[in-house]
């Protein structure tokens, strides 16, 4: 915290000098292009911006402070969350409605957003998408041509889930016409074409069925009901053990499901489960977010000049505002500069002092407090 405050003092002194120089420049009739911001902000969503669908911690007013009076974006920021399950444009619309500002899809980075980078490898291969929401629609939005949700995939195999007759619920479908069309014209023949990749897009809903079906796919080389085969690639959008939802205490996340699947798979197979996890705290996610923020800056100030301390068109500081030390703060520590961490007390973390294992650069009560500290340090009114 002392380092953060020292930086605040240095920034204030530097900016006073810049303002004095700016007053002199205002006398000229030919105004220079606006200064390019030297910092950006990444917000976690669950436990920082929202709890369930309800804004928390003064998040609407905090976010609105990053916009100009005319509603245009003034300070570059994005939402960096391990959540997902819907295409980024849908999440942007939801956040815009809840926060009262215009959020662009480019400002939403889900845990599954890096799956785009795997398109060349799997574009025309049969794949299965797992999780709540619209996992198949997410993958189709990224350009994958042969994708089925695990709901639809399992429905083609009679009695693959022996407990199905005892379940009293139906998995909700967002678009019945699309589902019927997919049933009549599936993107691939599940009984002859092997699944080449499994993508866990969001938190699974029916753990019992999904664990069974995934063990079938992964143990048989992608063709359930057949003999043992080489395991297809398996990807997880995140590895959170817990996260803050609407319930007062934390809920089990995708990391818990991964542990369950890995434990069971390793018990029934000779070789251990192989998988790749994305999401925070993976340093790749923070590097990707930094690149996206840089593009956002160029979109806001296409003709501006960088400040002297921003070298090679890179942001000098990126603030990560999160509620989970094991995920948000650990990720910043792994990523290193230019990332700086701010921990709120509105989600997973509720401590009085800093987290002992993954200490943040600053601990505040709410996201509104965090934005206030950032704008004060950066001398932004």
Image: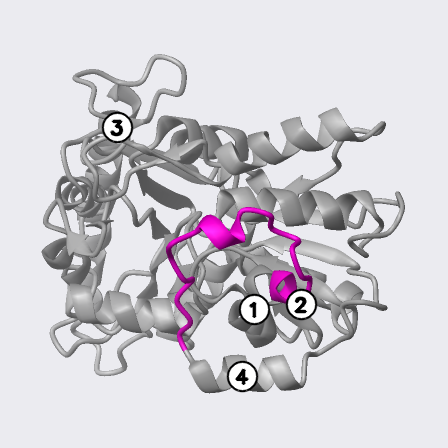
Q: Who comes first in sequence, dot 4 or dot 1?
A: 1
| Apparent side of residue 312 relative to residue 241 in the rendered image (left or right) | right
Asked if residue 117 shows in the view, the reply is yes
Q: CA distance from mark 4 to mark 3?
A: 51 Å
Q: CA distance from mark 2 to mark 4?
A: 13 Å
Instruction: Specify whether residue 2 is painted magenta.
Output: no
State the residue position of label 2: 156
Q: Residue at x 78, y 74 (%)?
A: 189
Q: Residue at x 27, y 82 (%)?
A: 30
State the residue position of label 4: 180
- Indicate the quadrant where residue 9 lies: top left
Q: Residue at x 29, y 38 (%)?
A: 244
Q: Which residues are magenta?
A: 153-174
Q: Few, some or many C-alpha atoms within 10 Å of disc 1 (few <14, some 14-19, many ≥20)?
A: many
Q: Position of residue 364 (x, y in %)?
A: 17, 31
* The C terminus sits in image quarter: bottom left
| Apparent side of residue 164 relative to residue 243 in the rendered image (left or right) | right
Is residue 165 shown above or below 86?
Answer: above
State the residue position of label 3: 362
Which circle, 1 or 3, is nearer the viewer? 1
**Label 3 close to label 2 by CB (< 8 Å):** no
State the residue position of label 1: 136
Q: CA distance from mark 1 to mark 3?
A: 39 Å
Q: CA distance from mark 2 to mark 1?
A: 16 Å
């Amino acid at each position: 915290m002392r380092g953060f405050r020292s930086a605040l003092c240095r920034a204030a002194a530097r900016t006073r000098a810049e303002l004095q120089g700016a007053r002199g420049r205002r006398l000229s009739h030919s105004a220079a292009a606006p200064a390019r911001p030297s910092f950006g902000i990444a917000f976690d969503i669950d436990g920082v911006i929202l709890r369930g669908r309800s804004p928390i911690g003064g998040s609407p007013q905090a976010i609105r402070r990053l916009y100009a009076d005319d509603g245009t974006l003034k300070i570059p920021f994005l939402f960096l969350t391990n959540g997902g399950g819907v295409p980024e444009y849908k999440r942007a619309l939801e956040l815009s409605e809840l926060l009262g500002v215009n959020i662009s899809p480019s400002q939403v980075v889900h845990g599954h957003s890096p799956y785009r980078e795997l398109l060349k490898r799997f574009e025309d291969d049969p794949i299965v998408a797992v999780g709540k929401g619209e996992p198949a629609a997410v993958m189709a939005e990224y350009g994958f041509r042969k994708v089925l949700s695990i709901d639809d995939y399992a429905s083609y195999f009679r009695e693959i889930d022996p407990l199905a007759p005892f379940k009293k619920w139906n998995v909700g479908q967002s678009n019945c016409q699309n589902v019927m069309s997919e049933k009549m014209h599936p993107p691939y023949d599940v009984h002859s074409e092997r699944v080449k990749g499994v993508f866990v897009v969001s938190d699974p809903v029916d753990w019992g069925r999904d664990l069974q079906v995934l063990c079938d796919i992964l143990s048989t080389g992608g063709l359930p009901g057949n003999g043992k085969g080489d395991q297809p690639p398996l990807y997880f959008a995140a590895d959170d053990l817990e996260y803050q939802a609407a319930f007062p205490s934390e809920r089990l996340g995708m990391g818990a499901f991964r542990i369950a699947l890995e434990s069971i798979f390793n018990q029934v197979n000779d070789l251990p489960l192989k998988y790749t996890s994305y999401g925070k705290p993976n340093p790749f996610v923070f590097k990707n977010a930094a690149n996206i923020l840089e593009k956002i800056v160029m979109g806001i100030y296409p003709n501006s000049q960088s400040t002297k301390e921003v070298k090679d068109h890179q942001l000098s500081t990126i603030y990560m505002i999160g509620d989970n030390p094991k995920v948000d703060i650990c990720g910043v520590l792994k990523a290193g500069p230019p990332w700086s961490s701010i921990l709120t007390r509105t989600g997973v973390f509720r401590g009085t002092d800093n987290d002992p294992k993954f200490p943040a650069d600053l601990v505040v009560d709410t996201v509104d407090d965090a934005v206030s500290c950032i704008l004060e340090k950066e001398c932004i009114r």
